Image (cartoon, grey):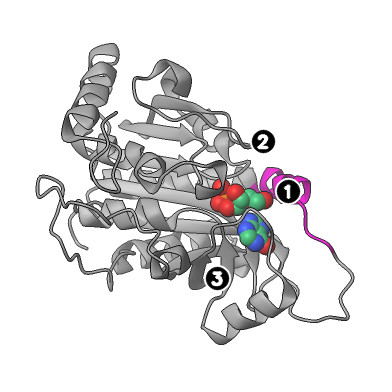
Amino acid sequence: MHTKGNCCCSFEDYKLTTEWLMNQTSHRPKVAIICGSGLGLLADGASNKQTFRYQDIPNFPISTVPGHDGCLVFGTIEDRSCVFMKGHFHLYEGYTLCQVTFPVRIFKLMGVELVLVTNASGGICPDFKVGDIMIIKDHINLPGFAGQHPLCGPNDERFGIRFPCMSDAYSKDMRSVVVDISTELGCSDFIREGVYCMVSGPNFETIAEARMLWILGCDSVGMSMVPEVTVAKHCGLQVVALSLITNKVSLDYSREEKVNHEEVLEICKMRAELLQKLVTSLISRFNQQQIINTN
Ligand SMILES: O=P(O)(O)O[C@H]1O[C@H](CO)[C@@H](O)[C@H]1O
Ligand code: HPA
């Protein structure tokens, strides 16, 4: 890869990777699903699967975090060709934000129209329970405030404009479809809506940090997703994002619980089946043209 300002990938890098993948598969996905920590199982329901390990794909970073398998799976759900990222990339792994978001631009060049993001996060809102699924309605890009932003550096107009609008990053129509689906599946008790805050990690928050995030209007906190969503929105992709609340973030010095990644993965396992049903139904609605291009 070449270095250009803050960006380490050139348009040719993106093109090369896209062409490599398109030459290996006959799938032409319109939907990409980014599976967060421990949520790679979401790909299991697909048929006609074709799997590529990240290390075999030109220019692709590799996953270094437990719970992230590190492969790209093409498959069919409800007659619709999809591509799943089983594992995504994080700043705390030492990747640049250009590397973290590399796959999103590959999706764009492949012809993807909708990116469905899942992740694990800590619940800050005191009403949230472990195992709840939060439909993300907005985010706070905390690393972005400090200049760790995936769109810093020369802007490539072939992907999008210099100053993209982010006030509608999470499709309102899609969010209401998720609510409808959860009612049909009988799981609306677990469904919340809220604001996700990205921190760089890798440590979990101190109590003072958690209190600050709550005052700032954050309902949950995690170490991912915001760069990918920002780049997806920049290049005109629709986004829907679901965050599984895997732990309650402590806002109180008297609480004894200590969060750890193993617990995060355990809760993901517990809710993977439900998330898979939600994701499948969402793809099928997209398939029925109910929500396409209505952002
Ligand atoms: O955001 P994902 O990758 O789902 O995972 C979350 O869980 C991990 C910490 O347990 C961090 O990577 C955090 O961001
Ligand atoms: O409490 C958390 N903080 C940050 N990231 C997370 N990912 C899962 N839980 C958490």
Say which label, 1 or 3, has the lower sequence index.
3
Question: How far, Cα to Cα, is label 2 from label 3?
Answer: 27 Å
Say which label, 2 or 3, has the lower sequence index.
2
Q: Is residue 268 magenta?
A: yes
Neighbour tally class for label 3: few under 14, some 14-19, many 20 plus, Cα within 10 Å: many
Q: Is residue 274 magenta?
A: no
Residue 46 seen by the camera: yes
Q: Residue at x 51, y 61 (%)?
A: 182
Q: Residue at x 73, y 48 (%)?
A: 261
Q: Nearer the viewer, residue 275 or 37?
A: 37
The x and y percentages for residue 54 are: 45, 23
Q: Nearer the viewer, residue 222 or 75?
A: 222
Q: Are marks 1 and 2 in contact (CB under 8 Å)?
A: yes
Question: How far, Cα to Cα, is label 1 from label 3?
Answer: 22 Å
Q: Nearer the viewer, residue 271 or 98?
A: 98
Segment tinted magenta in the rendering: 258-271
Classify mark 3: helix, strand or loop: strand
Q: Residue at x 54, y 45 (%)?
A: 36
Say which label, 1 or 2, has the lower sequence index.
2
Mark 2 vs mark 3, foreground winner is 2
Label 3 CB, ligand 2: below 8 Å? no
Identify the residue at the far left of this view.
157
Neighbour tally class for label 1: few under 14, some 14-19, many 20 plus, Cα within 10 Å: some
Mark 1 vs mark 3, foreground winner is 1
The x and y percentages for residue 270 are: 71, 47
Which residue bears the numbered disc 3?
A: 192
